[in-house]
Amino acid sequence: MIPVTPELMILGAVASLAAAAAVGVVAFNNAVRSALCLVLNFFVLAFVYFTLNAEMLGIMQIIVYTGAIMVLFLFVIMLLNLGAPQLLRDKDDPKVFAGISLGVALFALLGSQLLPSFLKVTTPNAPKDFGAPANLGRALFTNYVIPFEAVSVLLLVGVVGSILLAKRKI
Amino acid sequence: MNGVPLAAYLALGLFMFTTGVVGVIIRRNPIVIFMCVELMLNAVNLTFLAFARYQFASPVAISAENGDITGQAVMGGQAMVVFVMAVAAAEVAVGLGIIMAIFRLRKEIDIDDMNLLKG
């Protein structure tokens, strides 16, 4: 049995909040509520990243996901006026039962096969400052510079593509 | 954090991933389906970071020789997370543009009614 350390209790509290928010994304019928649950989930996930000593990525998670991506989502929801829960749900949809049972089966299968092997791994071996901005930046600009530039081209294509799609007349 | 098993992080990631899968299957609003895809991407990010931090394959703690750890494989997981975030941002921008275009065309957004490609 794993000893319940204070760190584990803190992580448990944060993780259960994240898990509850994740369920809220799926369960709420109103798209705005789903989006706000997703904001909460991403925000709490940033703190989970902090517990992994990945400070830079936690900050990036808050800025990029909760700051930029979710604002885009909420903007589109408001623009399309999807806030009102319009009848996008009929009660006896067989997909709901099938989807939930598939999800439970997937969780049980992967969890029972994978998780017990990692219960004994309790000491992080990476150095404490592996998530510092300086280290991450140096890695991105030396070993990973080609994927980094490829991603910048991808973002440029994304900008052009979204303008093309959103414009009524070219 | 010491004293936390790697399985705790992996369990959270697995739960978020399965929630996203279930959401993609059962929801009918394309924007919510998109959010569930984001949920899955974040679950994968969390898994990458957990493995990158624990480095369970190396028997002893990796020490920073002369203060530079960037040349080692330790940074691989974090670099991957950065790229996943950038790809997710591009994907959301283009995907929401597509949803806007479809909505402008059809005035309704039930994903089950979009079956133009059905053979």
Image (tube, rainbow, N blue to C red):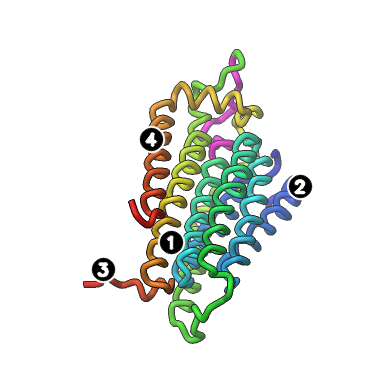
Q: Secondary structure at mark 1?
A: helix
- Spot occupied by residue A135 in the image (x, y as percentages of width and height): 58, 24
For the record, the magenta segment spans: B51-65
Looking at the rendered structure, the kind of residue marked 4 is Val
Q: CA distance from mark 2 to mark 1?
A: 49 Å
Name the amino acid type tagged 1.
Met
Q: Which residue is mark 3?
A: B117
Name the amino acid, label 2.
Answer: Thr
For residue B109, what is the image quadrant? bottom left
Q: Quadrant of the C terminus of chain B?
A: bottom left
In the rendered image, which residue does mark 2 sit on?
A: A5
Tell me, yes or no, whether dots 2 and 4 are on the same chain.
Answer: yes
Give the residue at x 67% y 54%. A15
**Labels 2 and 4 touching (C-beta < 8 A):** no
Name the subunit of mark 4.
A
> Closer to us: mark 2 or mark 4?
4
